[in-house]
Amino acid sequence: MPETRLPEQFRDLEQWIGWSLETEGERSDRRQASAMEDITAFYEAMLARMDEALSYLEQFSLEELPDDARRLFYLTLSLAEVAPAVEQFGQPSVVDGYDIKRFVATHR
Amino acid sequence: MAIHTHHDTEAGTSGTVWHEAYPELGTGPIPIEPCVSAEYFELERERIYKNTWLNVGRIEQLPRPGDYFVKDLPVCDTSVILTRGRDGVLQAFHNMCSHRGNKIVWEQHGSCQNFTCKFHGWSYSLDGSLRFIPDEERFCDLKKDRLGLTPIKVEMWEGFIFINLNPTPAETLTEHLGELGAGLEGYPFARLTTCYAWSTELKANWKVLKDAFHEAYHVPFLHKRSLPDSFTSPDNPYAHAFAFRLYERNHRMSVFGNPGHQPSPVELLAHRFGASIVKRDWEMADLPPGVNPTRSQFWAFDANMIFPNFDVFVFDGTYLTHHFWPLAPDRTLWEVKTYFPAAQNTAQRFSQEYSKVLLREALLEDASTLEATQSMLGSGAKKEFILQDQELLVRHGHKVIEDMVGFYRRP
């Protein structure tokens, strides 16, 4: 396991590094495959650090994020991915929803 | 074909009986048959899709001279190449070699100098002209200047690229868009250049999909979880749209937004850095007259429907489009695209991620009933759909399709 996957002051989020995923498809797959208690734990841990994370990331341009900052940025995108599971549905997938596997993202 | 003249009845309230403004539409049930009949479907293809302006993309897909993209249109039995030539001019062609009919361009988009057929190496410029034929001297009586790619009528409106497969269209694109289009001009489409898109193939008739987005009656039921209080309120529990406007074939519905909506924690955070389908902060000044046309304080968005299969939903700071592409009487390719300004930093990008995920979840709810509906329509147990006042656009949509199809006018 590499030593510095996240910026120093976000080491507490290291346990959630598996959520640091580049594409919507990857983030969605992880959400759909996760237990609700894991999703909720990630949501709570991440939400608590969002103000600091976004402030920290402000110093970089979107195109030139250092690797550790990029991993943190991807964690913020995973918070966006899991938010409806926690805030709206109380389960990983949309309740009675259309199969997300068939709803293909043609962006990254 | 002047069917409906416009009515100046936009200053409506939630109590308005909209059907009274459009008495020619009637109030009775409408037939299910057009959503299941193979004969109806074939007539739609011939009389509507091969004779109407169709949106196939946006100019941002062709940023530089030499760029092209391909749009397959099975509903029209063709595939279309859209090109921006070396001179920057936008053109459209059938994606078919003049020699033995092979499909020329197989990549969905790219940039090049020429299109070369894989079959026998015939080569065409981006302006469609035939440039090179291998072993040319073996052909007899070739008229190379008449053997270019077959052109298709193409026009652009506010950055949206439309084609018409009829070589002599009955109307210009401007006429086709009419007052609905004119009223939208000035909306910052060109500024909202970041596009997130999804597509899916559903086992349902294209009108079953389209109709699902042309009324808000379903919102308190289908979206009770994803959008529990954004488009409904204690005073408007059934999500009554507050303004409708029918044009000749296009139409618009202005959807109510609840000022008392309680944002969730992540939504609140996301809204600090950007727009969403549920944000109502009036960020955009000087909206054109066709956006929130009644200037209502309850405005959430306008659902604009451009005949036959293109919807443009405009919000404050973001817009989304639907394309419903018929594939078969009971199959449709549905494409959704949602647009934002290019993110300037990670916080804006995070905000857009939340917005598009929330939209996606609502769309997964929207799509959830459609195949089940289609599976029952074919049973024949019911012959008609029953429509209420707020389903006016569904009624109008079926009427304007039938006006062109003429299925019920057959001898």
Image (spheres, helix red, strand yellow):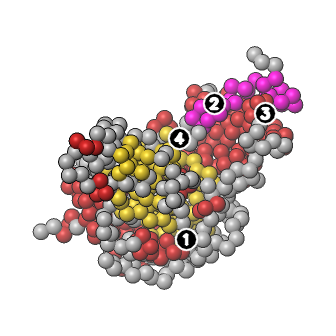
Q: Quadrant of residue A3?
A: top right
Q: Nearer the viewer, mark 4 or mark 3?
A: 3
Q: Earlier in the sequence, mark 2 or mark 4?
A: 2
Identify which residue is drawn at 48% across, 65% down.
B156
Label 2 and label 4: CA atoms lie apart by 23 Å
Identify which residue is drawn at 64% across, 39% down.
A81
Q: Name the residue under label 3.
A: A66
Q: Which of marks 3 and 1 is in front?
A: 3
B251 over B312 or under it: above or below: below
> Which amino acid does the dot numbered 4 rest on?
Ala
Is residue A23 in the magenta section? yes
> Which amino acid does the dot numbered 1 rest on?
Leu
Are callouts 4 and 3 both on one chain? Answer: yes
| Left or right, residue A35 beside residue B331 | right
| Left or right, residue B158 beside residue B406 | right
Where's the N terminus of chain B, which quadrant? Answer: bottom left
Nearest the camera: B153 or B211? B153
Instruction: In the displayed orientation, state which residue is furthest to the front.
Output: B137
Q: Pointer 2: residues within 10 angstroms few (<14), some, or many (20+)?
A: some
Q: Mark 2 lies on which chain?
A: A
Q: Residue B184 carries which label?
A: 1
Q: Give the range drawn in magenta.
A: A4-26
